[in-house]
Image (cartoon, rainbow, N blue to C red):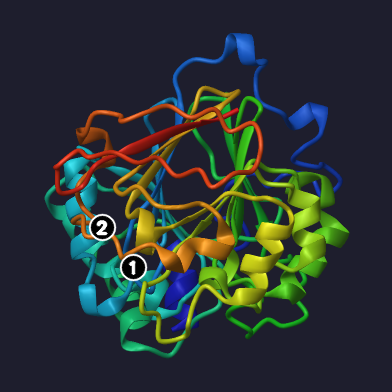
Amino acid sequence: MLVLLVSSAGCLGGGGQSPVDDDTDPSSDSNTTAPSEDLEGTLEIHPINVGQADATLIIAPSGETMLIDSGDWPNDGRTVIDYLNAQDIDRIDHLVTTHGHADHIGGHAAIIEHYETKRNGIGAVWDSGVTHDSAAYDRYLTAVEEHNVTLYATQEGDEIPFESEQAQATVLNPPADSKKPDDIDYNSVVVRVEFGESSALFTGDAGTNVEERLLETHAEALDVDLYQAGHHGSSTSSMPAFLDAMSPQATIISSAYDSQYDHPHEEPLAAFAEREIPTYWTATHGTMIFESDGEAWTVATQADATTDPTALREDSEVEADPTDPPTEYEPLTVLIVDEFSDHHMRSSVSSSAAVATGVIA
């Protein structure tokens, strides 16, 4: 399977992309996006409600798309494909495989098949290069091979290129000289996306050992606005020092309401609460859209639920179909988030999946 991975990619360690110089920090002046007054368009981040799994759509200001993970194998990509169709996404420019576990790549094969045969294709796949012995991973690599999709084995320092220089996606993990080359979680692909002054971090199932390494090697790049909580909000991730380095304005958790692993765990929720970080959970907020003009973020959710980490479980499970785009509904209210509060936004709207929007300044 490793031979298949490398041969499908055609190359290793950035897949032919020009990696960032080792001494270049992605947050340095030489590597920042254009000044905010020159920015055009918006950056969109869509955490899709895929239950006890992960799938996030990113739409760059240029219109290019990135899909980070694709949900669990029993669903076989149906939820993600339906959502992408609802958003009229005709092409996936970058498909990022954070790691090979089935709850992250379960929909890869179906999505590759769908986009290569019925839409305008997959631009490239970005993978850590660490294989996994599972049927889901085997189907994924088979789809890559059958459709001749470019597959890059990526590592820290690589940039996933957007056509527009106004947005950037930089890989911070896996390390180039991994001390645990066979550890699938340790080598999770960690991606920092930025547009103007706005930024977000996606860590897959990276644990505290990865977070410690990132603090040592990429500390300045960790200063971000949005953080998708590692390992579905598990206590194996989101250690206090890592959160302090990020100081995120909001955290996103992707896990099931009745998670068999009891995600999210109390330890990270307590850490979020201590730092007054508003927390959005796919199980209660549903599918979401975070949008930035390069300065401030707005957020639309399918359901009106608390963002207080200590009260997340007090709200009911979201009833909305996860493929219903939040933007199909009229905003109920606008909230300026200038300090930590309950952030409840209530309405008597009778639609099956009302939308709540807020502004994260």
Disc 2 crowd, CA 10 A, few/some/many (<14, 14-19, 20+): many
Q: CA distance from mark 1 to mark 2?
A: 7 Å
Q: Which residue is mark 2?
A: 80
Residue at 51% across / 22% down in the picture? 293
Residue at 32% across / 64% down in the picture? 316
Q: Which mark is residue 71?
A: 1
Number of numbered labels in the structure image? 2
Q: Is residue 310 left or right of residue 218?
A: left
Q: Element under label 2?
A: helix
Q: Element under label 1?
A: loop
Q: Quadrant of the N terminus?
A: bottom left
Image coordinates of residue 256 in percent, x first then y, are 37, 72
Q: Is residue 302 left or right of residue 240?
A: left
Along the line of sight, which residue is nearer the eye, 199 or 131? 199
Residue at 44% across / 44% down in the picture? 344
Image coordinates of residue 67 in percent, x first then y, are 39, 52
Q: Earlier in the sequence, mark 1 or mark 2?
A: 1
Disc 1 crowd, CA 10 A, few/some/many (<14, 14-19, 20+): many
Residue type indicated by callout 1? Gly
Image coordinates of residue 332 in percent, x first then y, are 31, 30
Along the line of sight, which residue is nearer the eye, 208 or 342? 342
Residue type indicated by callout 2? Val
Q: State whether residue 195 is above or below residue 211.
A: above
Q: Is residue 148 left or right of residue 15?
A: left
